[in-house]
Image (cartoon, rainbow, N blue to C red):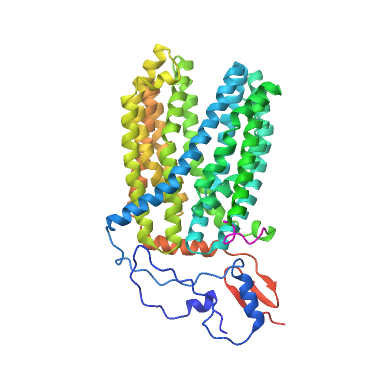
């Protein structure tokens, strides 16, 4: 029996270029030529490696860039729309539950007193900036690796990426924990009120268990999403959420744990979600193709591909989140700072609610694009991107029209003070333009994630928010004395610049080239240290290398 390795594959003559359609048959050809030399040991070894130790993808024929249609049939577009919505709608539910959890937490803090609210809100804000945004941003680097590997039918790489994700995020959490444990000292050192600093420092310590669970839960969620299982993710999030308010009541008032009972209730809910997701994966058999057992050697090796995608993804997310926090701090320097900060906080809350739709589309299209690129279907990947953009336009028009039409009603959800309602109503037209652009940008960012271009996204965000947005916002707000309206004008300028650059990049994407990049990403992500087994050298990238020389 002759065995094909990565080296002798490359030496074969180049096959004829095939035509590319939207759903070509994927060749899953094995790594031998069909002859049999009777070597039973090699046959048994190959059988044992089929689900785990990485037979490399065969070199796919070069796709013909002119062969796939510029405009796919309408039926294909509607079919893609159904696939996209089947993934996005459950994710919308997950995002809604996550946002509701934050609102409920703030409501409980508000009923406990001003000190509890101020300290808890400050701790939650710091936890988001210096914790969740870093872990989630780094974890996003797993998205294209898992999606492209699953599309390429290199299923074992999905499980290996999950293990590496756990290892990297837990390692990353260690310096975050050191920072959180010293929060009170840091806040006091920069001049924060002693009582508020103490309350925030104590509160953030109770957020630590939830952060550790997030390091395990978020990669597992991506693991399920890469395989198209988004509705079970929603159910696993929904059931524990139903007990969140009773748990808060129990911990805060019955057990008399006060404000610190709220993060403990969040931890219990997050832990239950993690357990339910793991249980579903085991009972449904979702792991059978993609999980070949935990290995410390795999988990703590070959971090390079993940870090190269994860670090710019983290930077991109943090740059965007931090720009909003800077604007919040700047609002406190305006005349009547209490009213200005409250109005800015309300606008940010409305923004987070509206953004749940595009962020769900963003996550869905990231998986769709990465799956299709991994399966060597550039036309289908491009179609998924274009359908997502069309959905983004529709959602942006609907939500922006609703905001403007209800500009005098929406503020009443937060306050009945006439001055406050008038201020928010006057901000809505400026805020709505910014929101329209932000909702367009969300799914475009998902396409960028699917093609594994986080570095480009981070660069665009850096220029848009810190080269255009923040300088413009501060200039309009303070120099031209436009106040909060000026801040939203600057934010709108940043998002217009960001959306334009990302749109140009997506429209100019060479999908055949991205298919080849996806193949390289999957191959690179499969590398591990060479191991010895049954007298043969085995490498996850090249498969069976040959008998060990003695």
Question: Residue placed at 52% from the left, 31% from the top?
Answer: 100
Q: Residue at x 36, y 23 (%)?
A: 427
Q: Residue furthest bottom?
A: 37
Residue located farthest toward the top when viewing the structure as drawn: 418
Report x, y in % for residue 163. 62, 54
Q: Quadrant of residue 123?
A: top right
Question: Which residue is most to the front?
Answer: 283
Q: Residue 499 at x, y = what percent? A: 36, 42
Q: How many marks?
A: 0
Percent position (x, y) of residue 78? 32, 52
Q: Is residue 56 visible?
A: yes
Question: Looking at the magenta stretch, what is its main secondary structure?
Answer: loop
Q: Quadrant of residue 177?
A: top right
Q: Is residue 429 above or below residue 550?
A: above
Left or right of residue 281: residue 351: left
The relative height of residue 291 versus residue 1 in the rendered view (above or below) is: above
Could you tell me residue 95's position as x and y percent?
A: 49, 38
- Asked if residue 538 is among those painted magenta in the image, a careful observer would answer no
**In the rendered image, which quarter contains the C terminus?**
bottom right
Residue at x-position 34% and y-position 65% = 21
Nearest the viewer among 289 and 492 is 289
- Would you say 115 lies left or right of 324 here? right
Residue 319 visible here = no
Quadrant assignment for the N terminus: bottom right
Position above or below: 482 against 385: above
| Towards the viewer: 132 or 93 | 93
Residue 288: which quarter of the image?
bottom right
Please give the range of residues in magenta.
Answer: 286-294
């Amino acid at each position: 029996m002759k065995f094909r390795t990565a080296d002798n594959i490359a030496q074969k003559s180049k096959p004829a270029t095939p035509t590319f359609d939207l759903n070509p048959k994927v060749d899953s050809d094995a790594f031998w030529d069909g002859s049999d030399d009777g070597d039973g040991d090699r046959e048994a070894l190959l059988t044992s490696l089929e689900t785990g130790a990485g037979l490399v993808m065969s070199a796919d024929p070069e796709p013909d860039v002119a062969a796939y249609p510029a405009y796919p049939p309408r039926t294909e577009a509607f079919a893609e729309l159904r696939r996209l919505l089947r993934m996005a709608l459950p994710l919308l539910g997950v995002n809604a539950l996550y946002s509701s959890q934050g609102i409920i937490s703030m409501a409980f803090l508000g009923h406990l007193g001003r000190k509890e609210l101020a300290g808890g809100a400050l701790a939650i804000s710091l936890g988001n900036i210096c914790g969740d945004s870093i872990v989630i941003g780094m974890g996003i680097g797993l998205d294209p690796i898992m999606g492209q590997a699953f599309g390429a039918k290199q299923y074992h790489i999905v499980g290996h990426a999950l293990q590496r994700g756990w290892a990297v995020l837990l390692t990353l959490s260690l310096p975050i924990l050191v920072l959180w444990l010293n929060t009170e000292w840091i806040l006091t050192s920069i001049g924060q009120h002693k009582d508020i600093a103490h309350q925030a420092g104590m509160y953030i310590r109770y957020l630590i268990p939830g952060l550790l669970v997030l390091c395990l839960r978020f990669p597992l969620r991506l693991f399920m999403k890469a395989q198209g299982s988004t509705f079970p993710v929603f159910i696993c999030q929904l059931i524990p959420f139903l007990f969140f308010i009773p748990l808060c009541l129990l911990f805060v008032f019955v057990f008399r744990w006060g404000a610190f009972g709220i993060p403990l209730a969040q931890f219990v809910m997050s832990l239950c979600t993690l357990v339910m997701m793991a249980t579903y994966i085991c009972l449904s058999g979702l792991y059978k193709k993609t999980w070949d057992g935990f290995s410390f050697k795999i988990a703590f090796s070959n971090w390079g591909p993940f870090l190269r995608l994860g670090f710019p993804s983290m930077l991109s997310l943090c740059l965007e989140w931090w720009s909003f926090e800077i604007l919040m701090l700047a609002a406190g320097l305006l005349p009547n700072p209490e009213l200005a900060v409250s109005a800015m906080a309300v606008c940010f809350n409305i923004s987070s609610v509206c953004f749940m739709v595009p962020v769900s589309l963003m996550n869905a299209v990231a998986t769709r694009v990465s799956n299709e690129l991994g399966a060597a279907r550039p036309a289908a990947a491009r179609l998924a991107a274009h359908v997502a953009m069309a959905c983004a336009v529709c959602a942006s028009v609907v939500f922006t029209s609703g905001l403007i039409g209800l500009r005098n009603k929406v503020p009443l959800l937060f306050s009945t003070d006439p001055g406050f309602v008038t201020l928010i109503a006057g901000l809505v037209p400026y805020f709505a333009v910014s929101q329209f652009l932000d909702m367009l940008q969300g799914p475009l960012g998902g396409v960028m994630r699917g093609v594994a271009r986080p570095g480009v996204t981070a660069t665009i965000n850096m220029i848009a928010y810190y080269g255009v947005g923040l300088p413009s916002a501060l200039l309009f707000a303070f120099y031209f004395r436009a106040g909060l309206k000026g801040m939203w004008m600057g934010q709108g300028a940043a998002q217009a610049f960001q959306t334009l650059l990302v749109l140009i990049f997506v429209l100019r994407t060479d999908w055949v080239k991205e298919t080849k990049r996806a193949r390289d990403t999957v191959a690179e992500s499969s590398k591990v240290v060479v191991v010895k087994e049954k007298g043969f050298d085995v490498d996850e990238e090249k498969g069976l290398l040959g008998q060990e020389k003695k």
